[in-house]
Image (cartoon, helix red, strand yellow):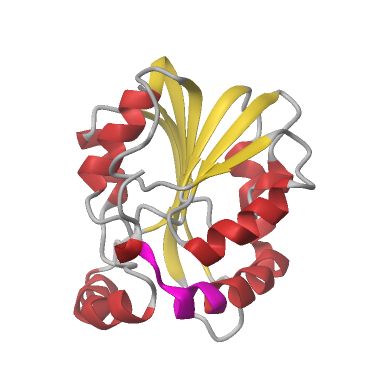
Amino acid sequence: MGDLSRYQHPRFARMYERMSGQAERFGMAAHRDRLLSGLSGRVVEVGAGNGLNFPHYPAGVREVVAVEPEDLLRGLAERAALTSPVPVQVVAGHAGELPFDDATFDAAVVSLVLCSVESQAAALAELRRVLRPGGELRFFEHVRSGKRVRATLEHLVTPLWWRLCGGCRPNRDTTAAIRDAGFTIEANDRFVFRPAPGSPAMTHILGRAHR
């Protein structure tokens, strides 16, 4: 598992717990349904947070192994796993060094996590490694805006945003990172979403790719 001390952000974790519940009521739950629809087999979810994806997994999923490095969020995820409609095992770990053998999973899920990993290339390489040949990657992420002025503002606020929001970087081109990691993107819906009144409207991507 390694040392997870650098992934501990208790102040942000408490804030995220409050804000994520509100976001579910403002449309996030519907996006989670779309993200996970049709999945089956054994699934690894990386950066599971407080487990809000768990109620949305379809019956065809045999098992979810959920990886979360932050202690407070992982505890909340363990509690959420108790009422999940599919079996969920929550484990400590981080995206850059997944504690699994090669070709172990039928599918992988990342949602609102590739913005905050230290290296997108390393995280995506690990996801590709643990997926079986032909395995599916499902992704739901906020990304850099396609509008020049807004993208420039996102770049300028990234250093402060990173400090306040648990390492999140709003200026990442995650679609390009997924392609560069060797995945073939088969669907990629790009849209602007505001998770709660008063929060910034950010560009998101939601889709699927294959190893």
Residue in the image at 79% along x and 47% along y: 83
Q: Position of residue 106 (x, y in %)?
A: 51, 20
* Residue 148 as seen in the image, left or right of residue 89: left
Residue in the image at 55% along x and 62% along y: 73
Residue found at the very far bottom of the displayed protein:
198
Q: Is residue 161 above or below residue 4?
A: below
* Residue 70 as seen in the image, left or right of residue 174: right
Task: Report which quarter residue 61 is drawn in.
Answer: top right
Magenta span contains residue 165: no
Residue in the image at 54% along x and 79% along y: 15
Q: Position of residue 25 (x, y in %)?
A: 72, 68
Q: Is residue 202 above or below residue 85?
A: below
* Residue 76 as seen in the image, left or right of residue 141: right
Quarter occupied by the N terminus: top left
Q: Is residue 42 above or below residue 13?
A: above
Task: Report which quarter residue 43 is drawn in.
Answer: top right
Quarter occupied by the C terminus: top left
Any part of residue 70 in sight:
yes
Q: Position of residue 167 (x, y in %)?
A: 32, 68
* Residue 26 as seen in the image, left or right of residue 188: right
Residue in the image at 22% along x and 78% along y: 159
Any part of residue 145 in sight:
no
Q: Position of residue 24 (x, y in %)?
A: 68, 64
Please give the count of numbered marks on the rendered protein. 0
Residue found at the very far top of the displayed protein:
133
Residue stretch in magenta: 7-14
Instruction: Tell me which secondary structure the magenta stretch mostly adopts.
Output: helix
87 or 158, which is in the foreground?
87
